[in-house]
Image: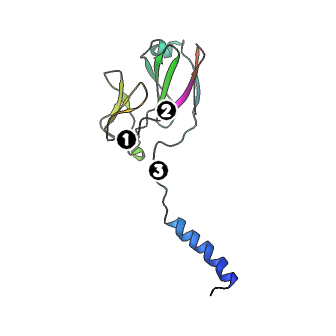
Amino acid sequence: MLNMTGRLLVLPIAAMLLFAGCKKDNIGVPLTNVDININVNLPEYADLAVTGGWVYLTGGSLGLIVYRNSPDQFTAMDRHCTYQPENLCKVYVDESQVIARDTICCGSAFLLLDGSVTQGPAALGLKRYNTTFNGTTLHIFN
């Protein structure tokens, strides 16, 4: 039978062994602080003037795609492909102007409307950021 000192030593050693066996996998797109304001009336954002328009922005993990869903609603998504994110694959809007895809690195495609997967192997949609719009300024944040 273990004395009190022996029990006190066994507990920390058992805890270290238990946690040493646990490996935290890097699952998903890295957390990145995003806090961006853009005036959608400026010439560089002219493509956002109409519903269905989109632009690339600097920010997030590998850049952002901002898509205008309606006159007062926008979707902002990270360009970092969610399939094997450690490979740092970046999606690009294709010729359809409704799909963002990467055919070389992650082999997946995503709908610009909401970032959902349209073609695998990705199982998770693009990482989305919060947006608010006051009629002039679009705020993108997490």
Whole-angstrom CA distance, mark 3 to mark 1, is 15 Å
Residue at 65 percent of width and 79 percent of height: 7
Residue under pointer 2: 128
Nearer-the-camera pick, 3 or 90: 3
Residue at the extreme bottom: 1
Q: Is residue 57 above or below residue 121?
A: above
**Label 1 sits on what residue type?**
Ala
Q: Measuring from the top left, give residue 60's x and y in whole percent.
A: 51, 35
Whole-angstrom CA distance, mark 2 to mark 3, is 18 Å
**Label 3 sits on what residue type?**
Asn
Does 128 lie within the magenta span? yes
What secondary structure is found at the residue carrying circle 2?
strand
Nearer-the-camera pick, 72 or 67: 72
Nearer-the-camera pick, 2 or 51: 2
Q: Is residue 93 above or below residue 16?
A: above
Residue under pointer 3: 26
What segment carries the magenta color? 121-131
**Label 2 sits on what residue type?**
Arg
